[in-house]
Image (spheres, rainbow, N blue to C red):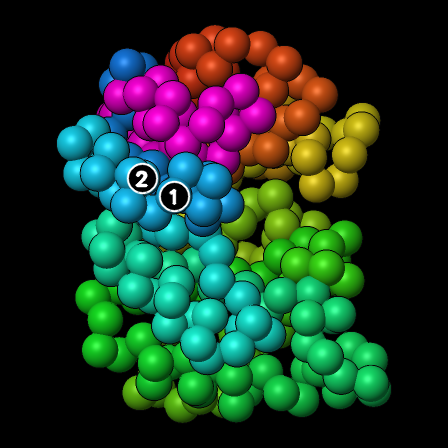
Amino acid sequence: MVMPVRQLGLDDLCVHQVCVSGQCDFVSSLSCLVAAGIKRTALWNPMIETCGERQALSIWNAIGLRADSLCAAELFAGPEALRRMLDRADLFEARTLVLITGGLEAAGVEGGIDEARTYLPSLLAQADELARPYNVQLAFEPLHPMVCGFRSIVSSLGEALDLLDQLGTAHEIGLAIDTYALWWEDRLDQKLSRAGKLISNYHVADWLADTSDLRLDRGMPGDGQIDLLQWRAQLEQLDYRGGVEIEIFSRDRWWKQAPESMLKEIIERLNFAY
């Protein structure tokens, strides 16, 4: 039984820029979002890099969108790389900077994943200190085990919570919660309750039973196996009132359609599928 959820409008909907990255560049992606009536997005750092920061910023300042986040900084890239990402997040006035660990190779250790994990508490503490002078909040995101080797060695919400607990109660790092990455996890309701007010971003995509690519075939909400309305109901019971952020990578399905068609479908399914 699905618990009641509040009625969402376009003010509550954030569509990540990466949703249309298969059809659009930095400039055209923002134009498509605005034309569809979308008011919030998450900026995708590789698209800024391709455009060039100066030009991207000029376009961004003129377009009238709000940035829920900039995606994504990597702990294993080191403090200078993180500082550059924090600078960029502040420059584009992003509310949060999504933070992942980076892959095992980026960790640069010889002892494998177990050794790499031992460095995470100190790296997170360092990141917390680096971020404090900025207007942007770090949002630590655990990812699906399928990308453990090359994107993130933190593969569950429970592990992410344990790491943040080691920082004590004074840290200012939040959590980015992704349905596609975490839907499989056992006792998830208990872990979401434990996360509570740490949740700063809520990413939404569906899991397709017949997925053709574990990373690049995310489902449109309502097309897969995740009870997304139940997810939202639980988060709202935890007093989450932030944006509902659609983040779909779809190389062989939606990226083969016009971006306008993809955005229309996202909007039509609001309050129905998620």
- Residue at (34%, 81%) from the top-left corner? 130
Q: Secondary structure at mark 1?
A: loop
Up-down relation of residue 264 to residue 223 (above or below): above
- Classify residue 239 by image quadrant: bottom left
Q: Position of residue 224 (x, y in %)?
A: 66, 28
Amino acid bearing label 2: Ala
- Residue at (47%, 40%) from the top-left corner? 50
Specify the label residue 56 is tagged with: 2
Q: Which residues are magenta?
A: 7-34
- Classify residue 125 by image quadrant: bottom left
Q: Give the residue pinned by disc 1.
A: 52
Q: Is residue 185 visible?
A: no
Q: Position of residue 88 (x, y in %)?
A: 32, 58
Q: Is residue 10 left or right of residue 80?
A: left
Q: Considering depth in this image, is 194 or 223 the residue closer to the camera?
A: 223
Question: Could you classify mark 2 by the number of other residues whose Cα lies within 10 Å: few (under 14), some (14-19), or many (20 or more)?
Answer: some
Q: Secondary structure at mark 2?
A: helix
Q: Is residue 247 visible?
A: yes
Confirm or deny contact between disc 1 and disc 2 (CB under 8 A): yes
Amino acid bearing label 1: Gly
- Residue at (54%, 57%) from the top-left corner? 189
- Residue at (23%, 71%) from the top-left corner? 134
Assess whether residue 204 is covered by the magenta stretch: no
Label 1, label 2: how many angstroms apart (C-alpha)? 6 Å
Q: Is residue 101 left or right of residue 55?
A: right
